Image (spheres, helix red, strand yellow):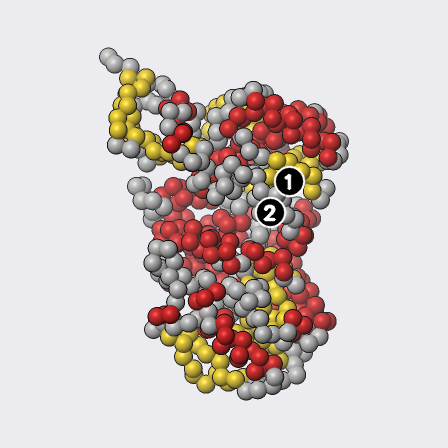
Amino acid sequence: MSNQVTVTIDGKEIRVEKGTTFEAIVADYQEQYDGLIAAVIVDNKICELMKTVKKDCKLSFVTKRDSIGHKTYSRTAIMVMTKAIHDVVGSHKIDKIKVEFAIADGLYCSGHGDFVIDQDLVDRVKVRMQELIDAKTPIFKRNYHIEEAIRLFEKHGMKDKVKLFRYRRSSTINVYELEGFYDYFYGYMLPSADYVQYFDLIPYEGGFMLLLPNKKEPTTINPFVPREKLFNTLQRTTEWGIRTKIDTVGDLNNEICAGRATEMVLVQEALQERRISEIAKDIMKRGGIKFVMIAGPSSSGKTSFSHRLSIQLQTLGLVPHPIGIDDYFVNRDKTPRDEKGDYNFECLEAIDVEQFNRDMSDLLAGKEVELPSFNFKTGIREYKGNVKRLGEEDVLVIEGIHGLNDKMSYALPVESKYKIYISALTTLNVDEHNRIPTTDARLLRRMVRDARTRGISAKRTIEMWPSVRRGEEENIFPYQESADAMFNSALIYEIAALKQYAEPLLFGIHKGEPEYFEAKRLLKFLEYFLGISSDIIPRNSIMREFVGGSYFHV
């Protein structure tokens, strides 16, 4: 009986020995690809390179330019970094090393224990990382029974993983080992340290930044540009999590199991309301503000936030009036198209910037102005008698994707504008080494809202998401640091609330469809969370914009 199997790659068949690793097969094809091959797709299933061929199959490659490949590279870099820190500092001196959140192309990490993070320590860790890379230190994947895995991580002082595994439904856990260092990762990994060829490590704000290439430039480490306002906003949310003792998914699940879900929800909502109140008071304090410009990426809860901010402004004696920049869309026949020929609603040219500035300037001058309303069904801007004149206490609350871009409001005096950046910047982690990307929470939000309000399938939402993300990176993120205030709309409980709505939608995506891998990843991610009922969410919550039942017209 032959011990060989047939592997089909790009329509061509090759014969290999059964038990050959995918890593060995990939080696013959790497030169044909611009980005590092980080994983393979075997008969519509993603497999790590350390796995072996067992039968005849069709094979395609996942590179570092793909989202899956990029995440695989990042996870592996985190493991190499964490192992290096334990080697340099000594495991007995470390309480925890935590990957906190992302800033641009870097991951901000903190360290706690009997050591000090300074330039000397960072330099020594970089040297140790490079040693592991140069030695091509292998990463082994082993399957442990859950009780055995819990004992292993208890032994190594990783309490966050012990808490997480308590709620694990499956009976086994995949554990990775790098030269005696054990860790758990949510997602795929590379087979050895030497795949992490591009990285940098720099001290930053009491911790350090792990800098990695982005998907577009897989071999380039871009210089780190500090984003102080974003960092401070994320750090503030992290401190809230520590103060409320909900830092990881295991902590969140513990609170739910202890029957404290309602209290947790109300505390989170109160924290957000306090921040909205602070922003309203700052607007009032500055004086002369007539235009509050609100911008943020998709599914940040901009509409609910603008309503709640308006209420706070009213408590201070101001009279807010909401305006949507979307009402200034050019007529559909003048809308620019992207490289695929689809309408590009997210570029600045899709907005009648000139008319917007004329109207806002006239309002500022005390003139009476009839404001437009865009008919999304006909694709035409209409006028329906919405006439406004600004009084002394009147403020326009303007919401739209380009609100932070000064080209959008070029004719308005700087002193008349107050710019707010809003985003769902979750700082809750799966565990200390597995962060939750903010884009995952926003994607789940949008998926649930799209299905509820527009009848759009999860498949379609996932399909559109890369285009939405490109628009954000071009039109929103470059301007976030210019904001006068930042508001984090993430709620520590939100994924537990979204779970019951998102899972049925994701299960509707079938194997073989292009969106299946992302759906499967999100379903696996949701398995970590215990669910909570949306009944305990207040009716003015930003979450109501997505799950329904809001007091506001959202």
Give the residue drawn at x 55%, y 55%: 477
Hey, what amino acid is under mark 1? Met
- The image shows residue 329, relative to residue 232, as above or below, that is below
Marks 1 and 2 close (CB-CB < 8 Å): yes
- Packing grade of label 1 (10 A; few <14, some 14-19, many >=20) is many
Q: Eyeballing the image, is 295 above or below 50?
A: below
The residue at 61%/53% (across/down) is 264
Work out whether 83 lies above or below 403. Answer: above
Seen from this angle, which residue lies furthest top? 1
Residue 200 is labelled as none
The residues tagged by marks 1 and 2 sit, at their Cα atoms, a distance apart of 9 Å
Q: SS of the residue at dot 1?
A: strand
Res 445 visible: no
**Which residue is under mark 1?**
209
Number of the label disc, if any, that sits on residue 103 = 2
Amino acid carrying mark 2 in the image:
Ile
Image quadrant where residue 223 sits: top right
Give coordinates of residue 317: x percent, y percent: 67, 78
Q: Secondary structure at mark 2?
A: strand
